[in-house]
Image (cartoon, rainbow, N blue to C red):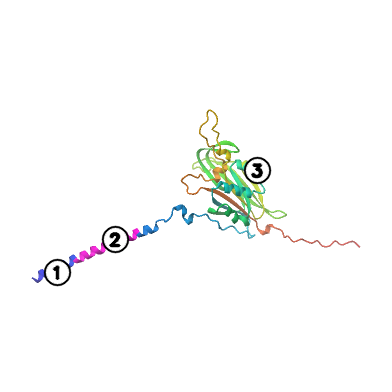
Amino acid sequence: MNRSVTFLYAFIVMVMATLATLTIGCATTNSSSDSSAQETTQSAPLRPEWESPSNSPMKQITLPVDDGTSDGIAVIRWQIFDNPSVISTFVKNHPPSQISIEDQKRLASNGFLVAEVQLSALAEALNDLGGTYANIRAWLGEATTWHQLTSFQIRGSYAAVIDGSTRRLNDGAIQLLMRGWTVPLETGAVTDVEILPAFLAGGEVPGARTTLREPFPSAGFFVSLQRGSVILITGMTPKSSKESSTRGPFAGPPVVPPPTLGEILLTRPNSESDVLPLRPFIVLIPLISANNFFDDAVVESPPVQTPE
C-alpha cells in the first residue's frame, strides 16, 4: 500500500514539473517574439527616405585654411542639386577673371562651365548653390604631373560631341586631367593651373595592349591664379542638344544628339527613379605659402653723397 502511494505521489510531482516547464518555455518564447516585433516596429522609418535629415544638403563644411605655410592645390568634389537656373545664375555672377568670353563660349560648346570666387567667399558660394550632398576632399600639393579629376569608362563604342563634331571612341576612358604648381614672381607667387580633357585608348580596360592618350586642348583651359582665388568646374548640356526640328514632310520624332565632354564627365545621368537630381562640381583651391611673397615695406636707399 505504501509503495503504491509513493509511486502515485512521484507520478503527480513529475506531471506538475513537466507542465511548469512547458508553461515557462511558452512564456519565454512569446516574450522573445513580442520583443522582436516591438523592435521591428520601433526601427521602421517614420517618414519617407527623401525627408530624412541625413539627406539634407550640407551648407557648412570644412575648407582648407590658407595659413601661409602650404604650397599646392586642394581639390573638393561637391554634389549640387541640379537646378539649371540656379547654377546658370551662379556662373554668370562669378565669371572666371582670366578666361575670355570667347573661350567661355568654347568651353560651353564642349559642355563645361567655369566660375571663380574668393576662398573667403566659398562658403557663401556654396550657400548660393543650395548646399552639397557630398564633400570629398583631396590634397594634391604641387601637381607637376597630370592628375585625374574624374573619368568615364567606355566598353565597346561610344559617341561624343567634341568641338561641335561627333566622334566615336572605342574601349578606353574619357578623362578630365589637371596639373598645377606655384610660380614665384617679383610681385608675389601665383598658381598655374591647367585643365585638359583627354581620351585614354584602352588604358583602363582589362587586357588592353595600348595606352595612347589623345588630348582635347580646345575643351580645356589654363589660368594663373592669384592667392585666394578658387576655380569651380561643372558640366552642362548645350541648348542645341535639346532642340530637334520636326518640320518638313519627312519629320519624325526628335533625335537627341550625343553628349558633350562636359556632360559625360561632370553631369550625373538623372532618371525618374532618382530622388534628387544632382550635378557634380569640382572645386580647385590653390594655396601659396608666405615664403613666396616679398616684404611690402619700402626699402630706402642710402642718400647719395655729393662730391665736394
The x, y position of residue 213, in whole percent, is 58, 41
Identify the mark at residue 143; answer none if there is no mark: none
The x, y position of residue 302, in whole percent, is 82, 62
Q: Which of 183 and 122 is in front in this view?
A: 122
**Residue 47 higher or lower than 217, as above or below:** below
Residue at x-position 39% and y-position 58% = 43
Q: Of all residues shown, which one is farthest toward the top?
A: 249
| Residue at numbered disc 2 | 30
Q: How much space separates mark 1 and mark 3, taking CA atoms?
A: 104 Å
| Residue at numbered disc 1 | 9
Residue type for callout 2: Asn
Task: Indicate whether residue 21 is drawn in magenta.
Answer: yes
Q: Element under label 3?
A: helix
Callouts 1 and 3 close, C-beta under 8 Å? no
The x, y position of residue 99, in whole percent, is 66, 46
Q: Which of 186 and 248 is in front in this view?
A: 248
The x, y position of residue 301, in whole percent, is 80, 61
What's the magenta bit mostly, secondary-structure-wise? helix
Q: What stretch is highlighted in magenta?
A: 16-37
Number of numbered markers:
3
User: Nearer the N terminus, badge 2 or badge 1?
Assistant: 1
User: Nearer the N terminus, badge 3 or badge 2?
Assistant: 2
Q: How much space separates mark 3 and mark 2, taking CA atoms?
A: 73 Å
Identify the mark at residue 103; answer none if there is no mark: 3
Crowd tier of the residue under label 1, counting other residues whose Cα lies within 10 Å: few below 14, some 14–19, many 20 or above? few
